Image: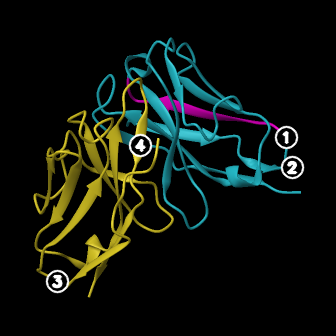
Chain colours: A cyan, B yellow
Amino acid sequence: EVQLLESGGGLVQPGGSLRLSCAASGFTFRSYAVSWVRQAPGKGLEWVSGISGSGGTTHYADSVKGRFTISRDNSKNTLYLQMNSLRAEDTAVYYCAKDRVAVAGGMDVWGQGTTVTVSS
Amino acid sequence: QSALTQPRSVSGSPGQSVTISCTGTSSDVGGYNYVSWYQQHPGKAPKLMIYDVNKRPSGVPDRFSGSKSGNTASLTISGLQAEDEADYYCCSYAGSYSYVFGTGTKVTVL
């Protein structure tokens, strides 16, 4: 079964750091671009960051550029999101999602999400 | 990287059709044939309903259809059913492994 499973969420103070992980199974992980997408409480979906299958290309939303770093370990079939200098507005459910094909073409597999709360 | 514009809500009676618009720019919707649509029920992860503007993944009912003209994409739900009540988001590829989502539309089945 094709599956993504996020972990690493929790409560963190403003200015703190957190690292999210997304474990992939059931498909050839290295062959697909993957993204992090977040949803603040009661709000819509926001694409946060994406990375190519090889890990050689990354892209970030302006709202997190310079604070978040996306990476992947294809030997461990795992995607990461290092989040630094966290702000209250980063509070959200964070989903990882796999591109349907190598790149673009929509995101066909989503994890269940992990909740990040930034509060003092 | 501005969000694509969608109506906040649309509604229809069972059996009717509803259409949700999604307006972007030439840098996203108008620049690529990679518009996708997602259905999200409360507390659940989004589900891919349409990809590449007008293609349906296996298992998605043919009541769901997509189209695009210029910088505006549309999702039409025909023969509306109670289980279609959910939030719907459009999404466009924007180049360099990046995406932009729409503002989201709540579909209510009357």
Q: Please name the residue that numbered disc 1 is placed on.
A: A16
Discs 3, 2: same chain: no
Q: Quadrant of the N terminus of chain A?
A: top left
> Label 4 vs label 1: CA separation?
27 Å
Q: Please name the residue that numbered disc 3 is placed on.
A: B14
Q: Please name the residue that numbered disc 2 is placed on.
A: A13
Q: Nearer the viewer, residue A51 or A96?
A: A51
Picture quadrant of residue B65:
bottom left
Q: Is residue A24 inside the magenta stretch? A: yes
Residue B52 in percent (x, y) is at 20, 39
Mark earlier in primary sequence (4, 3): 3
Q: Which residues are magenta?
A: A17-27
Taking A86 as reference, is B78 left or right?
left
Q: Quadrant of the C terminus of chain A?
A: bottom right
> Label 4 vs label 3: CA separation?
31 Å
* Marks 4 & 3, CB-CB < 8 Å contact: no
Q: Please name the residue that numbered disc 4 is placed on.
A: B100
Mark 3 chain? B
> Label 2 vs label 4: CA separation?
28 Å
In this view, the residue farthest toward the front is B26
Discs 3, 1: same chain: no
Query: What's under tag 3, amino acid-wise?
Result: Pro
Q: Is residue A12 inside the magenta stretch? A: no
